[in-house]
Amino acid sequence: MFVTKIIFGLLVFFVLGSSFAGAEASSREIVDDFLHNYCYDCHDSASEKGEREFESLKIPFESIQDLVMAREIIDQVTLKEMPPKKKGQPKDEERLEVLRVLRSEVKAARGRFQSNGGKTVMRRLSNREYENTLKVLFGRRVDTLGLT
């Protein structure tokens, strides 16, 4: 009975783990396909028109620069300013799909980059906060202005 539970647990773990890995790969593929079809002609490492180069964009985002680059792509694709009118245009479904993926990746990356890494951030107490802390600890009001 115990062995059956372990085998079942491992099976569930591997099935769910592989589905999450597939989801990440599909997000990367969606963005890579879109950029390859509509952006790399002008914004690859050789051209860099408008000082934009999208070949270095990594998903999931690994740096603040990736996050900024993704925000620029989101803005241009949302406004339908890129790709230019003279170039082939993506279907609305393609635009919406790449925007959905990029926005979800930006949301996930924001949490990673703005995190303090699980560490306690030290800061100074204001005079009022310090007085209230002493009042709670000692059960009486302490005038801290006279201590200086």
Image: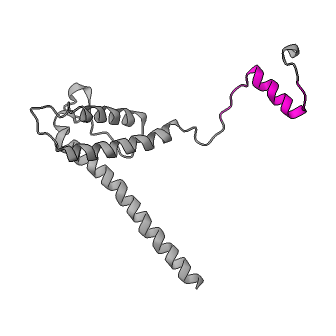
Question: Looking at the picture, does residue 32 appear above or below residue 19?
Answer: above
Q: Nearer the viewer, residue 43 or 24?
A: 24
Q: Nearer the viewer, residue 22 or 51?
A: 22
Q: Is residue 82 visible?
A: yes
**Relative to 92, 68 lies left or right:** right
Query: Hey, which residue is sitting farthest left in the picture?
Result: 86
Q: Quarter-wise, where is residue 35 in the image?
A: top left
Question: Looking at the picture, does residue 104 appear above or below residue 83?
Answer: below
**Relative to 53, 138 lies left or right:** right
Which residues lie in the magenta part?
A: 121-141
**Relative to 103, 143 lies left or right:** right
Question: Looking at the picture, does residue 85 appear above or below residue 3?
Answer: above
Question: Looking at the picture, how far across and down is residue 112, in whole percent?
Answer: 49, 41
Q: Is residue 46 visible?
A: no
Q: Is residue 86 magenta?
A: no
Q: How many marks?
A: 0
Query: Which quadrant does the N terminus fall into?
Result: bottom right
| Residue at x-position 11% and y-position 35% | 87
Q: Name the colouring of the figure.
A: one colour
| Residue at x-position 55% and y-position 77% | 6
| Residue at x-position 54% and y-position 39% | 115
| Residue at x-position 58% and y-position 37% | 116
Question: Looking at the picture, how far across and down is residue 7, in whole percent?
Answer: 51, 78
Query: Which quadrant does the C terminus fall into?
Result: top right
Question: Looking at the picture, how far across and down is residue 9, in whole percent?
Answer: 52, 73
Query: Hey, which residue is sitting farthest front in the picture?
Result: 140
Q: Is residue 125 magenta?
A: yes
Q: Quarter-wise, where is residue 105 in the image?
A: top left
Question: Looking at the picture, how far across and down is residue 101, in whole percent?
Answer: 33, 46
